[in-house]
Amino acid sequence: MSIPAITLLQEIKSDFEMMYMANMQTIKMKPTGENLQELKEKYLESKNSLELNIQKYNDLILAKKTNDEFLVSNLMQSQMLEYITLYKQIVEKHDSIFQQCVDGIISKQNAIFLLEESETRFHETVKENTKMEINGMETTQDKIKEIENEMQNTFVISLGIVLALGVFGIILISRFISSPISNLTQITNRISKGEKLEIKSNSINSDVNDVLISLEKMSKDLEEYKSKLIKQEKLSSIGELASRLAHDIRNPLTVIKVTLDVIKAKNKNLTPEDIEKFERVDTAMYRITHQIDNVLDFIKGKPLKFKKYQINDIIDSAIEDLPKSENIKIEIVYEKSEIECDFEAMKVVLLNLIINSIHAIKDDGKIKIISKIRRDKVIIQIEDMVLEFQ
């Protein structure tokens, strides 16, 4: 029960983080046009995913065993409902703060402070909820130990009765009951401590063999769940670190952009060379922001949007994002063709390959990009050449 619940809680935290970052970027950078629309789409996508994962977590409350009993206790059901209510309240407050900032009811600085406070509260709530789920798992293990103790007590009482029946009864029971039960108790104790066991079902008692087979399966399942939980925790930590790092990078980018805008506004007599330099800085900042978005999309597992695009449109868009250089000559030779892909993802691939070529020729030479059609395939070649003059 706790393993799927913890996985959902990590997804819920990641979705809220994406909502928060989209709103913070909207407030700080004041984007317009396509950038604003992109941020709105990212926000809505994250919010829809968050609501879906909260609903999935709510569905776990009503999950039942094969005997029609609930998987979780009444107390844990009540606690899970309280956390779901808290998540919805925090999200509602988060949206209200953002809308008040957009409507001009509260200042940008006050909105940023309140949104950061809302994010901190959401993370703390997820952390407490996760701790509750882990405690629930430990409680289940304690119940297993209680059952083992009851089995031991039952064995002691049965043994006392058997002793009264005589030596033959003791030997018989020791062979068919006492020894197998003792062995089962030892096995369950070792499994409860987290040991991975290979259990051999070679008892002459068929019922004991059935129990041994079930215990072996339980041991393997527990080991698998343990590995998945550890892997999930590692991935969650990496994802959280990457999200935090991306979030921290956005703040200085905002300061740089605002400072450049102020400099351009105060200097009306800029030369064409100066304006070109400012444009190059703006392009570089956009590329960094776009790379950060790609990292966050990867962490969240954003699905690719496949559509048909002209290959030359993708190549031209990638070249426009390259840093300007008079020492690099780019020649494009292409046959008109169309491919089905995610435009931004394919653009990033081409952009990285072209940048690698630029580095290979040490920022001085010629790069030739060729796209051609071969049967039912579109082939893209990127060739880097160093120019030599005498």
Image (tube, helix red, strand yellow):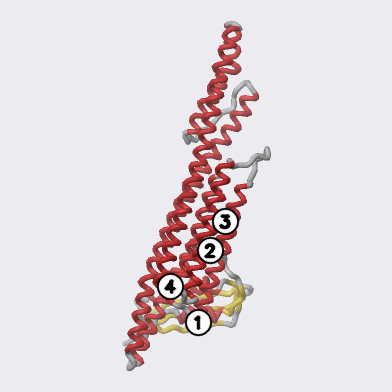
Indicate the quadrant containing the C terminus: top left, top right, bottom left or bottom right: bottom left
Q: Which badge, 3 or 1, comes first in the chain's sequence?
A: 3
Q: Earlier in the sequence, mark 1 or mark 4?
A: 4
Residue that label 4 marks = 289
Residue 15: x, y in percent?
51, 61
Give the answer, above or below, for where 55 lies relative to 168: below
C-alpha separation, residue under disc 2 versus residue under disc 3: 14 Å
Q: Residues within 10 Å of mark 1 (few under 14, many from 20)?
A: few
Q: Which residue is mark 1?
A: 316
Mark 2 sits on what residue? 92
Residue in the foreground of this view, choosing between 272 and 134? 134
The Cα atoms of the two marked residues, 2 and 1, are separated by 42 Å
Q: Is disc 3 placed on a helix, strand or loop?
A: helix
Contact, mark 2 vs mark 4 (Cβ under 8 Å): no
- Give me the C-alpha separation between circle 3 and circle 4: 29 Å
| Mark 2 neighbour class, 10 Å CA radius: few under 14, some 14 to 19, many 20 or more | few
- Residue at 59 percent across and 70 percent down: it is 305
Frontmost residue, 389 versus 55? 55
Tag on residue 339? none
Q: Of the residues shown, which amino acid type is indicated by label 3? A: Ile
